[in-house]
Image: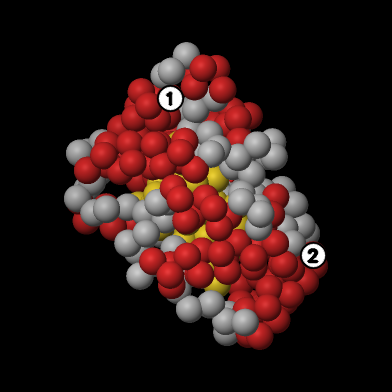
Amino acid sequence: MSTRPLVIGNWKMNLDFVEGLHLVQQLGVLLKSHPLEHVEAVVAPPFVDLRTVSSILDAERLAVALGAQHVNANENGAHTGEISTSMLSRLNVTWVIVGHSERRTHYHMTDEIVRATSQSVLRAGLRAVLCVGETLAVRDADQHEAWVESQLRSALEGLDASLHPLVTVAYEPLWAIGTGVNASSEQVKEMTDFIRRVLTSLVSSAPQVLYGGSVTPTNAATLVGESGVDGFLVGGASLKAESFYAILRACDDCYALKR
Ligand code: PGA
């Protein structure tokens, strides 16, 4: 791990703003009593929680950045039900998850929309977490590298070089998301190495590469220690302060040991 580890909690469609407030308060207690030295922590609550979570992070001076789970690629206008990058920036959001597989699969987020959304996020000066990953059928057909490469190329090819430093990639195989079956350290290593190789031909910076898919306090230390990944995108285990903190701690300890 060459850069500070990054751990992002994706709450998905869980926790209303009161529950979100409680979670961040509990996380704050843990972070204040046992501070983390190296890890960069981000929470990505539902849109309607952002203002509350932003206020509490600010009031408690917590070293946790704010992320959004999605955004519309357009700047404004007639897009009923959608949210723009400028709306997010006004709420102190600095990270946006782009192209999560649940959006690609259930909400018709095509490669073209992922590309437009990435560009819009990056041009707004926000940091994009571009999600890529294959289904089990694609992996069984031994097409996972080609699949992920095509997702990366489609999203990033031709991107203005000034925006490269704002790109982060999350490898999230669909068969590992929310299933309780995480990819093995070998599989994560193989794919993060592959993604880094593809990225050298696409961007001039060296983006952090995260892993996501059933990361828990039990497997986090092994995964981060053995796979060479730069951190995690965490779903289910980010919904409890103790389990999210334990994953942050595992990454912090690993970085301290390897430095
Ligand atoms: P999970 O979700 O940790 O619940 O598997 C990960 C994700 O979808 O980002």
Q: Quadrant of residue 124?
A: bottom left
Instruction: Judge: label 1 CB < 8 Å from ligand 1.
Output: no
How far across and down, in percent of the image, does residue 49 sit?
69, 62
How far across and down, in percent of the image, does residue 123 sit?
33, 54
* Label 1: few (<14), some (14–19) or many (≥20) C-alpha neighbours in 10 Å: some
Task: Look at the numbered discs 2 and 1 and tell me whether their residues touch, using CB distance below 8 Å.
Answer: no
Dot 2 amino acid type:
Glu
User: Helix, strand, or loop for circle 2?
Assistant: helix
Quadrant containing the N terminus is: bottom left
How far across and down, in percent of the image, does residue 173 sit?
53, 34
Q: Which mark is residue 92?
A: none
Q: Which mark is residue 144?
A: 1
In depth, the one of 125 and 202 nearer the eye is: 202
User: Helix, strand, or loop for circle 1?
Assistant: helix
Please state which of the two labelled residues, at mark 2 or mark 1, is closer to the viewer: 1
Distance in Å between CA atoms under marks 2 and 1? 38 Å
Residue that mark 2 sits on: 19
**Going by the image, does 26 lie left or right of 127?**
right
Residue at position x 70%, y 81% from top?
Answer: 29
Residue 66 visible at all: no
Dot 1 amino acid type:
His
Depicted 248 relative to depicted 185: above or below = below
Depicted 20 relative to depicted 105: above or below = below
Q: Earlier in the sequence, mark 2 or mark 1?
A: 2
Residue at position x 53%, y 39% from top?
Answer: 184
Residue at position x 20%, y 39% from top?
Answer: 201
How far across and down, in percent of the image, does residue 159 sit?
25, 43
In depth, the one of 7 and 80 nearer the eye is: 7
The image shows a total of numbered marks equal to 2
